[in-house]
Amino acid sequence: MNPMISKWLKSETIWVLTIAILTAVSSEIKLTPFNGEHFRFGVGSITFLLLILIRLPKSVIRTGVITGLTVVLFRIFSNVIIYNGTFSASFLEHYPAFFYYFVYVLLFRFLNVGRLIEQPFKLGIIATFIEIIANSAEHILRFFILSNSYLGFSDWFLIVMVAILRSFFVVGLYSSITISEQRKRLDEQLTLGSDLYVETLYLQKMMNHIEQIMADSYDLYRNLKKQQLQDQGIKALHISQEIHEVKKDAQRIFSGLSNITMPKTEDVYYLSNIVEFVVTANIKYSEMLNKKIEFKVENTVDFALTQQIPLLAILNNITANAIEAIEEDGSIVLQVSDYQEFIHFRIKDTGKGIAEEDLDIIFEPGFTTKFNQQGVAATGIGLSHVQGILQMLGGKIRVERPAVGAIFHIEIPRKNIQKGVE
């Protein structure tokens, strides 16, 4: 997006004017329940509350005043231009609407409703109370200025019922929007965590290699020293010291990545959540590769997880490989079931399958059957790390060769991934 447009959209003034204009326009979608007067229940108040909840203005009172004035002016000019009414009669008819918004924002500010954004039930109750008072203020004002208006029990009952319906409708709509956004952020965070988790495994493997190289360099230094080869020995010692520094840097990076991939969070992920994340992410991946793939999930077990990121890394890798094995269109079936003390995952695809002679080596580092358009082989370390993660979780993996495609069977001890089980 253009920086100027982005800055313009983030402007507080623009947001306040947007609230005012949208409220004024939507207020024309209305119901006039009381005979003989122009008190209305419109969509404008719903729009107003929803917008200030979505992005709370810096000054709610100023926003309410501007909105109230905009609504009154919009109604007056609509009445004059469209219905050929007089300005004075239109003003007398519509200016009480200003007091609805004015009283509304005064109470909104006084009761500090912004603090209840994440408490939907309390927010709904307070919003209902505010609307009842604001609607009553407008209705009472119309009673005094309009000779044909009256105040009856049915009027107040209707005001209360509409306030309840409108307020809880808005709060429910707002909650659904925020929950959807939170879910999207959690999906992104979990997917990123899964990707980083695999990278930490690569880094850990590299650190083990560095450790071995450092030990070999130091042994070389000692041997050269025994042979009275001082210059070569000093160089070998210097190499060993440099490798040690590289190892320390790698350890610091590993520690930082570990904190990211295994965050201390109160969010609870269920097995069904992870399966859903895997399917959603890989549907997008298949679409990116311009492949038409039908995903089917059969899940008969669910519980809270302690190892959601390692499990996501395993299932994502196997499912992505299945997508890559399918030429243009096909299907992938992900089944989850429990058997005795194990959770069993079965991933079946209709791809090109695995050659029988490759079954014994597909989990070895460096093995691959995938090449890019230039004929360069892929890294071939995905399945080897899947096996490594499974070994850490006490699980195992095997491959079955059906007539079409391939089937991966994964078994993990339930106690190693279920929350609250020792």
Image (tube, rainbow, N blue to C red):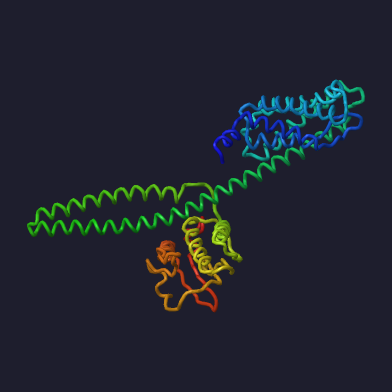
Q: x, y (%) of residue 392?
A: 41, 62
Residue farthest along the front direction in this orientation: 374
| Side of 413 relative to 205 (left or right) | right
Q: Residue at 85% of width from left, 20% of height from top? A: 88
Residue 404 x/y as whole percent:
55, 76
Q: In this picture, is 259 found above or below 336?
A: above
Number of callouts in the render? 0
Q: Nearer the viewer, residue 163 or 38?
A: 38
Residue 266 location in percent, x, y? Answer: 52, 47
Q: Is residue 52 left or right of residue 3?
A: right
Percent position of residue 333, x then y: 58, 68
Can residue 90 be seen? yes
Q: Which residue: 39% across, 57% down? A: 201
In the rendered image, is residue 394 in sight?
no
Relative to 242, say whether 374 is above or below: below
The quadrant in which residue 349 appears is bottom right
Query: Which quadrant of the rendered structure holds the N terminus?
Result: top right
Using the image as rendered, state which of residue 289 and residue 415 is in the foreground: 289
Question: Does residue 273 sit above or below 101 in this rendering?
Answer: below
User: At 54% across and 53% down in the image, what residue appears?
Assistant: 269
Where residue 72 sits, quadrant-wise, is: top right
Q: Is residue 21 above or below residue 181?
A: above
Depth check, front residue: 195 or 421: 195
Q: Residue shown at 83%/22% (left/top)?
A: 91
